[in-house]
Amino acid sequence: MERYEEFDQRTYAEWLLALGEGRLPYTSFEGRRRLPNDLIEIPPMFHSPSLEHLLDYVYGGVFDGDEVEDRAILCQTNATVHEVNSLILDRFGGEVTSYFSVDSVKEDPGDRLRIPMDLLNSVNVSGLPPHELKLKVGAVVMLLRNLDVDVGECNGARLQVTRLGDLIVECVFLTGERRGQRIWLPRIKMLARDSLIPREVIRIQFPIRLTYAMTINKSQGQTLRRVGVFLRRP
């Protein structure tokens, strides 16, 4: 963690401003033909030696409670988000409860297309909970649907799991005007598109997913105080 505190804050702020304004020079990678020629090099002072080190920097070993409400790891893909969230879920105590979704597709009466259930279960897009939703009491999750915007039950709200039932998941709000208030979530029907499947996917599942890590796109609109960016590739 000390590695992140060594650089001068003014230098960092100036670098961020230059990045946002497009004033940083492009980096050429001779001999690596598959890489684009408009990459920007991130200075070594901002690098983390490992994913575990990055998790420690962002969360400091604490993965439940109010201290994690404004922290997140940002990732490029949903597969990486799932990997990081699973790693964090394993790092704090408690029993894991798995909830499995019921998946189907919108059928066309004139089409005989049959999609294997394994393929439907593997759909993992940003606005949809996973087929196997693994949760623990104390875990921090994000609401994925607008249930009642007028009372703050909206897409992107961060919650903490307080009880895991067979038919209901109980949470408390970590942010917003309803901070500290309880919400009881049932399974609901959700629709999503996936590039691998020619039909709209229907998934019946609890409308939440772990939110220690999220895609860069999903972080838009969030207020975060400490962030790590996990880049598997340029």
Image (spheres, helix red, strand yellow):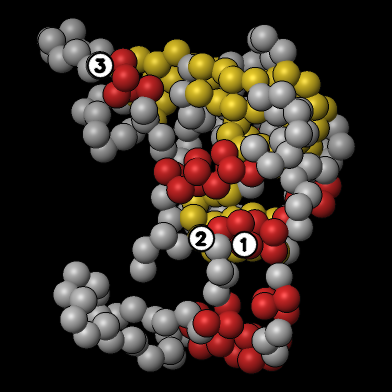
- Please tell me which residue is depicted at 85% across the width and 32% down the height of the picture: 181
Instruction: Name the spot of residue 129 as percent of width and height, x first.
Output: 51, 30
Identify the disc placed on residue 94: none
Is residue 152 something one can see in this rendering? no
Identify the disc placed on residue 230: 2
Disc number lying in front (1 or 3): 1
Pointer 3 residue: 116
Q: Amino acid at mark 3?
A: Pro
Instruction: Name the spot of residue 63 as percent of width and height, x first.
Output: 74, 45
- Please tell me which residue is depicted at 42% across the width and 43% down the height of the picture: 79
- Report whether 183 appears left or right of 107: right
Pointer 1 residue: 54
Q: Quadrant of residue 14?
A: bottom right
Along the line of sight, the residue nearer the viewer: 213 or 17: 213
Picture layout, residue 27 above or below residue 149: below
Along the line of sight, the residue nearer the viewer: 217 or 3: 3
Instruction: Name the spot of residue 125 as percent of width and height, x first.
Output: 41, 38
Which sits earlier in the primary sequence, circle 2 or circle 1?
1
Is residue 230 something one can see in this rendering? yes
Q: Amino acid at mark 1?
A: Leu
Instruction: Name the spot of residue 137 as percent of width and height, x first.
Output: 76, 28
Q: Disc 2 vs disc 1: Cβ atoms closer than 8 Å?
A: yes
Along the line of sight, the residue nearer the viewer: 54 or 140: 54
Q: Name, please, the residue furthest toward the right.
A: 180
